[in-house]
Amino acid sequence: MSTNCLSIDTAVSHGLNTIHRQLEKVLAKERPRHDTIGPQLMRAVLDSFSGNYPPPSPDDDEEKGQRFRTIFISDLHLGTPGCQAHALMDFLRTHPSDSLYLVGDIIDGWQLRRKWYWPQSHNDVVQKLLRRVRKGCRVIYVPGNHDEFAREFIGHHFGGVEVVKEAIHVTADGRSLWIIHGDHFDAVVQCAKWLAYLGDNLYEFTLRMNRHLNSLRARMGLPYWSLSAYLKQKVKSALNYVTDFEVAVAKEAKRRGHDGVLCGHIHRAEMRMINGVLYCNDGDWVESRTALVEHYDGRLEILHWAPSHEVQKKSESNAVIGAQVSV
């Protein structure tokens, strides 16, 4: 490994260790308040990654693969056992892009408030994102509700990553997409936060069951399967919630004069027309392992990613050409 690469990795690791120490100080207090943990955590990030870095080394870990104009990912939930960091690293290594949108819930502040969890694989994801910036990729970060602490730093840059409240992305074929996380359209998050926290705990329990189940399936030679996604499909109230969310987001995008909207939040990758507006959701990296990509001709596509030891598949039924969704 070159000296440049080593110094970059050392600087990033030092930065994350600083975050850990800052967070531990907050967690040492009795009943830490959100308005205390947020600024301290984010300031540690800003302090650690706002400096200058040497140019990337030729032996950086970027592999040659299909290049996209833009990649959109959200709901990584770094800082939780449910984050599929190894699969995400596999995806990022093989899919370079000119621009990368981080559409919220990148770091799970809700879970980190309860218990510190930050394995090396999560550290690797952060390093990878920063390396993309240094290699010339524009990275735009739109915070969500789980990383809402970052919203106090809208307009700042750290490590070259732009932190914005929302964004407007114009595709290569001229369509205007409104980029938001989507939690402002979630009545539970906005009006009953205690219920959102309760739901988050139940969701983490489901993910824990899901990990044990898929460990057993892997030993039996069976592919990955999402228990929580299955339950969402079967519970009528959950389906109604998803539909209401999608319609509300699309309606607001239309009111603002955009051709479409791209969001995350509900952990369900989707791309369809709703009342003349293109609704896109890039999914998540705790269950579905999905990303939304833009080709150089403006086509949008949802990729369902499997690590190299599994079979990769593309969601051909969700490919978009122009403003039409081919089903």
Image: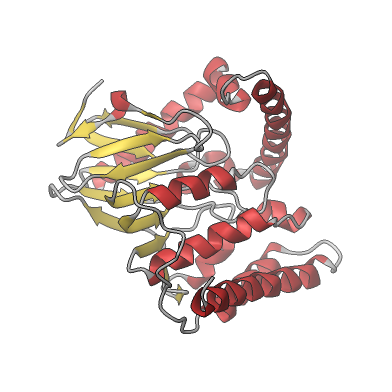
Q: Is residue 76 above or below residue 210?
A: below
Q: Is residue 73 above or below residue 242?
A: below
Say which residue appears at 20% left-offset and 40% top-offset. Answer: 299
> x and y percent of residue 108 in the render?
62, 53
Quadrant position of the C terminus in the picture: top left
Name the residue at the front extreme. 1
Say which residue appears at 62% left-offset and 20% top-offset. Answer: 221
Q: Is residue 304 above or below residue 7?
A: above
Q: Is residue 243 visible?
A: yes
> x and y percent of residue 230 in the render?
57, 20
Task: In this rendered view, identify the residue nearer to me: 1 or 254.
Answer: 1
Q: Is residue 122 left or right of residue 260?
A: right
Using the rendered view, name the quadrant where residue 261 is placed: top left
Say which residue appears at 69% left-offset and 75% top-offset. Answer: 18
> x and y percent of residue 173 in the render?
13, 47
> x and y percent of residue 7 in the render?
56, 79
Q: Is residue 230 left or right of residue 167?
A: right
Using the rendered view, name the quadrant where residue 42 is placed: bottom right
Say which residue appears at 35% left-offset and 52% top-offset. Answer: 64
